[in-house]
Amino acid sequence: MLNRIKSHFLHFDWIIFSAVLLLSLFGLIEIYSIALGQESLSFSNFRKQIISIALGLIIFIFFSFIDYNLLKSFNKYIYIFGVILLILVLIIGKTSRGTTGWFEFFGFSFQPVELIKIFLLIFLARFFSNSAVKMRPLKSLILSFLGTSGFVFLILLQPDFGSGIILYAIWFIILILVGFDRKYFLIIIIPIIAGFFLAWNFYFQDYQKNRILTLLNQQENSLSDSYNVSQALIAVGSGGFMGRGVGFGSQSQLKFLPEAQNDFIFSVISEEFGFLGAGLVLALYFVLFWRLLLTVKKCNDDFAIFFVLGAMVLIFIEMFINIGMNMGVIPVVGISLPFVSYGGSGIIANFILIGIIENMVIRNKA
């Protein structure tokens, strides 16, 4: 038994683990720093984040021992479980800032949509690993779209537009990676344009439209709709090369920067650690993507290949959107920075994701 455990950890990709752990610690430092600027000096969010990281590490180790082939075998049941979670959260979930997307128990909240992202990766990896996909590309495109839409539809009912975009983006990019013919993408683009037009007129709330419109004209609305982005840009610029130091960021400490520990934590890092700190965070993501790409090359079955590629897509999209929000080039849609932002749901789900990938690393070495 001990030899098996020893062998298990010897085959770990410790570079992947180290990268995500350092990113989490980076976020923890900034959450502590933000707490210093609170009037009541409350460290409750800092303590919750420590608990989330600790729980995430335990679950990470658990999933690293679970044979990933079980996920492939039970993918239908996992998908159904995901649908049930999204229905339940609409019925009994907690509503915060107009979105009904959290289960709350014992003072902790959990957002099931973070798990749904992993469930979608399992569904798509299993679907596209089927050899019949290449023989019936149009049917496969439609069925994979419908499978993705099942999750997205329920998520939009919350409503959580940002997560819906991410799920569709994962599906779309995986289509490219699978190698679908270009003509099929024309079939996709037309409904996307039509869907955006319908959403703009019948689904988007005024504040969502304003986020997009003010992105195009930030200076005119710098003190109203684009306030968040303006403050984020000030924070990024004020950090300089070396940063102001932990606890000395004026934008975050004086509460000019809203959602500092979540949506705009990259701005806090840039302000307090400067260009060097922001560059280190980006370097850690680069190392993570590099190791995940090496994992793809070593995997010997299509399910593992598509799952790891999907995980790379998911982490990259969330990173790109979050940093883009902080830099004022993407509308604010409430997407956290993976492994860094405050939020137990995201931390735990991300560690589950990495735990599954570690199991793939180990089993493809055996």
Image (cartoon, helix red, strand yellow):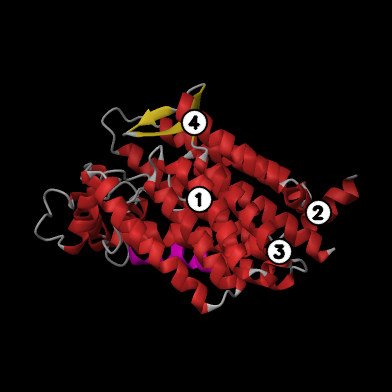
The residue where tag 1 is placed is 149
Classify 10 Å Cα crowding around label 1: few (below 14), some (14-19), many (20 and above): some
Indicate which disc, 1 or 2, sits on the residue closer to the N terminus. Answer: 2
Q: Quadrant of residue 178?
A: bottom right
Q: Is 275 in the magenta?
A: yes
Left or right side of 271 for 65: right
Look at the image and give the residue range highlighted in magenta: 274-286
> What SS does tag 4 mark?
helix
Residue furthest out toward the top: 106
Tell me which amino acid carries mark 1: Ser
Q: Are marks 3 and 2 in contact (CB under 8 Å)?
A: no
Disc 3 to disc 2, C-alpha distance: 26 Å
The residue where tag 2 is placed is 8
The residue where tag 3 is placed is 129
Instruction: Tell me the number on the disc at residue 89.
Output: 4
Residue 81: horizontal and vertical position, in percent? 63, 37
Residue at the (31%, 67%) spot, across then down: 241
Disc 2 to disc 4, C-alpha distance: 37 Å
Indicate which disc, 1 or 3, sits on the residue closer to the N terminus. Answer: 3
Left or right side of 309 for 247: left
Residue at the (67%, 67%) spot, across then down: 133
Nearer the observer: mark 2 or 4; the answer is 4
Indicate which disc, 1 or 4, sits on the residue closer to the N terminus. Answer: 4
Disc 4 to disc 3, C-alpha distance: 31 Å
Classify 10 Å Cα crowding around label 4: few (below 14), some (14-19), many (20 and above): many
Disc 1 to disc 4, C-alpha distance: 18 Å
